[in-house]
Amino acid sequence: MYTWFYGFSEEPFNVNPDPVFLYLTKTHQQALDDMVRALQERKGFALILGDLGSGKTTLIQYFLNTVDPKTLVKAIFHPPGTIEDLLEEVLRNLGVPAASHDKDSLVGQLNDFLHRLSPEETLALVIDEAHEMSSKVIEDLRLLPTPENISSRKLQVLLVGQPELKDVLKSERLKDFLETIEVQGELHPLSEEESRLYISHRLQKADSEISRVFTPDALDLICQHAKGNPRKLNILCDNSFLIGYGLSKKKVDSAIVSEVLEDLDFAGEEERIAWKSEESLKPKTLAYRIKNPLFRKLAYSLLALCGVGAIILLGRMYLKSPEETVSSRFPIKPPVVKEIRPPEAKPDLAAKSPPQPEAEKKPSAGVPEPSSPAIAEKKPSTPPSGGETKSPVPLPVAETGPAPRKPESPPVAGGPKPSAKAEPKFAVTKPIPVQASGPGAKEEAVAKKTVLVRGKDTLYSIALRNYGVANTSIVDQILEANPKIGDPNKLSDRQSVRLPEVHEESLLIPSADGTCQVRLGTFLKAEYAAFLKGEPSLRGKTVEVIPRKLPSGETWYRAVAGQFNTREEGLKVIQELKRKGLSPYFPGFRKKK
């Protein structure tokens, strides 16, 4: 998925075993030499041990491609549970149909095959994951070299498995057999220096190099936490590139690796706290000095609550005027809005109007000088009578300047939509939950194309094929059109995915009053939208970052700007951001530093 972004010729850290990417460390070279020696010297049985992910299967595949042509090698990567099934699979690999499922018959067929080999030829059985075999199967396997072929040693058996295989062989039943195995090798974890060379080797195979895609700190973190395990190195590097690609970062830094380590549970609790508090040194030092983990969690929870409270306070100060706060939060209670909004002019008239509907008509007829209070009185009376004809006119006027705010309030509360003034704020918050988009109408309105999931597709790979760009902003649009998809990285083969149109017009969020807002992007973290700060085209506009909870439990953050009085004004900003490469919805996106 990310190969083109980082300039790789192929995926360098695919977890599937590939002998092309094998890096022969000292321990791997020794194990390979042991395997070759066991065959050349016809030792009968050999044993190679290694932890999960140490590179055993990759080494086997490399070994299969390098053995002497006179040696017929057959590998079994997942041994069956019985000796009969094992022998049947061996015969099938040799092209010999099994005559029956009887053990003696199958052993006889195998011996017949061995007799037909020339003296220079030999058959080698390489059994991977041998630790999964029972002691009974291993014991039966030991008896395969029969007196007829034991002298010629035409059958070699190489057992490759995890360290627990040796514990099985040490059992009372098999300890004598273990002593007869002359060749025994073991794969040890890589050192940190070997880990760096391993990463460098795989990047070179993909036509890249470490300094181009990793910062030194990021590389140190990966090598430290992989603990010399090749599979863990692959997983950490692969996921780091995936997140870096989603953030459009050409170089993976320590922040990205820290996020990967935390997501994959590679890091302990203390390390997670350290990473999260790196942004401010004082909380970090304090957290490290406090030993009690419960107290530490409580302290961070309180800090988080204070931060959220500060954000809410600032949001209410800068995103809403004092008059709008109550009406936007409680749009169904216009009388409350009326009592809060009127200023000093004739407050007693406003007090009379709610209990006496008749009094409301009288002030509306005679309101020569105190125009503001008269309009405020009309607010409660208009909902039943239908003052809608007057509401469209003052609305735009009130939005443009502070002076006409009072004349504008009567039509807003007077119509059946008392929240018209606060509507833009609702337009910002409506798209936050996935469910808010509606499974039916939203899909039909937005989705213009349907594709089928192919194999291991994710929404990112589908986005890349169809939009030429893949990041959380595009994937968020796709998720909106497919509310039944819970996780963008987990799709079923042949699953249908609706693809919405993504263009300049689709990034406008219209409001009922004719104004609109602009989608700026969706990000994995709120701080990732900070590159928009100070952007000249957004000067004078409010940029809101809104949490969006996914069904998978993950939280993304949408950035929205507004209000724009016309669609043309909003489109002009979108076009300017696109031209500068600051809109993640289009190819060429690059965050300014």
Image: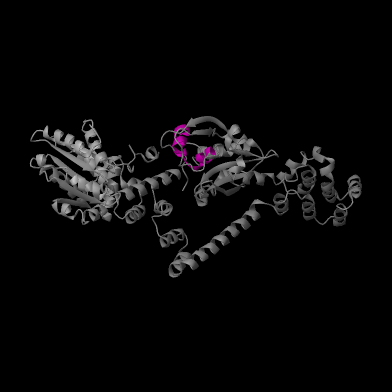
Q: Which one is nearer the viewer's eye here, 129 or 68?
A: 129
Q: Which residues are magenta?
A: 458-478
Looking at the image, which residue is at 88% across and 46% down?
A: 364
- Whether residue 189 is visible to the viewer of this picture, yes or no, is no
| In magenta stretch: residue 469 | yes
Looking at the image, which residue is at 7% across and 35% down?
A: 119
Majority secondary structure of magenta residues: helix
Q: Picture coordinates of residue 103 (x, y %)?
A: 22, 39
Q: How is the image coloured?
A: one colour
Q: Is residue 136 above or below residue 496?
A: below
Q: Picture coordinates of residue 269 (x, y %)?
A: 43, 61
Q: Which one is nearer the viewer's eye here, 179 or 220?
A: 179
* Left or right, residue 211 beside residue 456: left
Q: Quadrant of residue 348?
A: bottom right
| In magenta stretch: residue 473 | yes
- Whether residue 401 is visible to the viewer of this picture, yes or no, is yes
Q: Picture coordinates of residue 388 (x, y %)?
A: 80, 39
Quadrant containing the N terminus is top left
Q: Picture coordinates of residue 549 (x, y %)?
A: 55, 48
Q: Which one is nearer the viewer's eye here, 533 or 222?
A: 222
Q: Quadrant of residue 424?
A: top right
Count of numbered circles on the image: 0
